[in-house]
Image: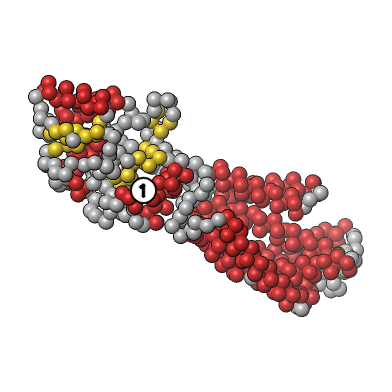
């Protein structure tokens, strides 16, 4: 399952397939028209390219030895020129189709990828045709002259070699740009770095094998060149540490399962009066998590980057709207918990009162902590805040909150077992408390 983002329509897969087919069909028709137009001038273009590639000045030592193959090269060149012509249209259609299902950083990454891959493709063509291949042909031509051979070159072979070199250069360029853009736009982290590399190298290797099928002695060096070229260029530039990476301790629950907890503070447009030193787990503050889709997308990225298993949101004034993101939280392999739904600054007398209660609300949390740990933390806090009056509520209903509390009251949600122990403990000390 995938995340259901706000801009993405909740429609069937067939609807997406129909939209893709419609856009793809339009591009095919435009490509054919552009290619047919280029076919009217393709002979002039090929003649110009051959003159550049030919290593002989006078007389020209290239010739056509396979007319049937030349016809294939003409049509292939016309199709290639037509494709280059409509690249901006292809990029626009791809982005419009993909954008509703992409988060902001993914959309930015796709834009940069389309722009830089287009520029890289054009630069590769220009560099290879005007500089690289003429230099290589000149070098080979000089070697033949020195050996005493009479040089004669097949124009089809020359063009085929140039197209092959351009294709391999393009694959390496796209692989490098894909990894660098994914890293710079925040889509790559230490968790999915191997995932990105495996797929980039896998797709490029598959395309090389299919492009030069049957030429094993040629394929293996190309695979090695593509792999090492990408790794040498990319590795020094990639940062394994994502800017969304948060320091969060791993906690083992009673079953020995690893748990990582994220506290999400929704300010709901208000001032930030929270004491961040109270939290020993990961904490991130959002402006309006319940309303802004960008904030929600950021939350999904944080959960994915850090592999959080539990999400505890507090401070939000609109819990009903916040619950709408629960399916996406679940798809992200995380659980949205409700223990702190009533913990918002407006429910307390002042910021200091809010922060004192934050201490107690965190201390009373169980799962993955045990009841014994919660009991110990609560009693330790009661020693530190002896002037406070406990307001004891049941964990059966976290949405319930006292209508009126004093500035020295601390709200504690406990299970029935801990509640009995706490009452007995307070009675022995002669302290006042309130049962909710």
Residue shown at the point (51%, 49%) measured from the top left: 2
Decide if residue 400 is on the left or right side of residue 367.
left
Decide if residue 298 is on the left or right side of residue 95.
left
- Looking at the image, which is closer to me, 349 or 50? 349
Residue shown at the point (11%, 38%) measured from the top left: 408
In the rendered image, residue 221, in percent from the top left (x then y), is placed at: 73, 47
Q: Is residue 295 above or below residue 283?
A: below
Residue shown at the point (49%, 56%) measured from the top left: 10
Q: Is residue 284 above or below residue 428?
A: below
In the rendered image, residue 116, in percent from the top left (x then y), is placed at: 56, 62
Instruction: Report which residue position mark 1 lands on.
Output: 323
In the rendered image, residue 412, in percent from the top left (x then y), is placed at: 21, 34
At mark 1, the secondary structure is helix
Picture quadrant where residue 169 is located: bottom right
Q: Is residue 127 above or below residue 217?
A: below
In the rendered image, residue 423, in percent from the top left (x then y), is placed at: 17, 25
**Residue 24 visible here:** yes
- Looking at the image, which is closer to me, 419 or 268? 419
Decide if residue 109 is on the left or right side of residue 420.
right
**Residue 352 visible here:** no
């Amino acid at each position: 399952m995938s995340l259901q983002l706000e801009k993405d329509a909740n429609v069937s897969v067939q609807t997406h397939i129909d939209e893709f087919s419609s856009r793809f069909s339009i591009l095919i028709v435009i490509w054919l028209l552009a290619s047919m137009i280029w076919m009217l001038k393709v002979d002039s273009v090929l003649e110009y390219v051959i003159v550049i590639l030919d290593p002989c000045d006078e007389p020209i030592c290239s010739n056509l030895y396979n007319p049937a193959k030349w016809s294939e090269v003409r049509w292939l060149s016309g199709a290639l020129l037509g494709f280059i012509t409509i690249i901006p249209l292809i990029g626009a259609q791809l982005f419009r189709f993909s954008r509703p299902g992409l988060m902001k950083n993914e959309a930015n990454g796709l834009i940069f990828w389309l722009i830089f891959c287009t520029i890289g493709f054009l630069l590769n063509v220009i560099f290879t045709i005007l500089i690289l291949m003429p230099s290589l042909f000149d070098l080979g031509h000089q070697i033949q002259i020195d050996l005493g051979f009479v040089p004669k070159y097949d124009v089809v072979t020359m063009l085929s070699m140039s197209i092959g070199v351009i294709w391999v250069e393009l694959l390496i360029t796209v692989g490098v740009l894909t990894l660098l853009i994914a890293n710079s736009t925040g889509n790559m982290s230490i968790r999915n770095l191997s995932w990105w590399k495996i797929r980039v190298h896998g797709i490029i290797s598959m395309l090389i094998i299919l492009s030069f099928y049957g030429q094993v002695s040629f394929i293996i060096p190309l695979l090695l060149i593509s792999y090492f070229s990408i790794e040498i260029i990319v590795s020094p530039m990639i940062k394994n540490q994502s800017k969304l990476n948060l320091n969060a301790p791993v906690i083992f629950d009673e079953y020995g399962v690893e748990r990582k907890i994220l506290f999400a503070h929704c300010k709901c447009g208000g001032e930030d009066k929270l004491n961040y030193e109270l939290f020993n787990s990961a904490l991130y503050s959002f402006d309006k998590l319940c309303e802004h889709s960008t904030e929600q997308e950021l939350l999904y990225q944080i959960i994915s980057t850090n592999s959080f298993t539990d999400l505890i949101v507090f401070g939000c004034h609109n819990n009903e709207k916040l619950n709408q993101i629960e399916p996406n939280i679940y798809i992200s392999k995380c659980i949205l918990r409700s223990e702190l739904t009533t913990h918002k600054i407006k429910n307390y007398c002042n910021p200091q009162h809010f922060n004192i209660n934050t201490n107690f609300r965190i201390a009373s949390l169980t799962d993955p902590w045990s009841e014994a740990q919660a009991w110990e933390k609560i009693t330790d806090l009661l020693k530190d805040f002896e002037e406070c009056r406990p307001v004891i509520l049941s964990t059966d209903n976290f949405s319930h909150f006292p209508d009126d509390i004093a500035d020295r009251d601390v709200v504690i949600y406990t299970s029935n077992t801990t509640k009995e122990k706490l009452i007995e403990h307070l009675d022995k000390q002669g302290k006042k408390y309130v049962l909710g």
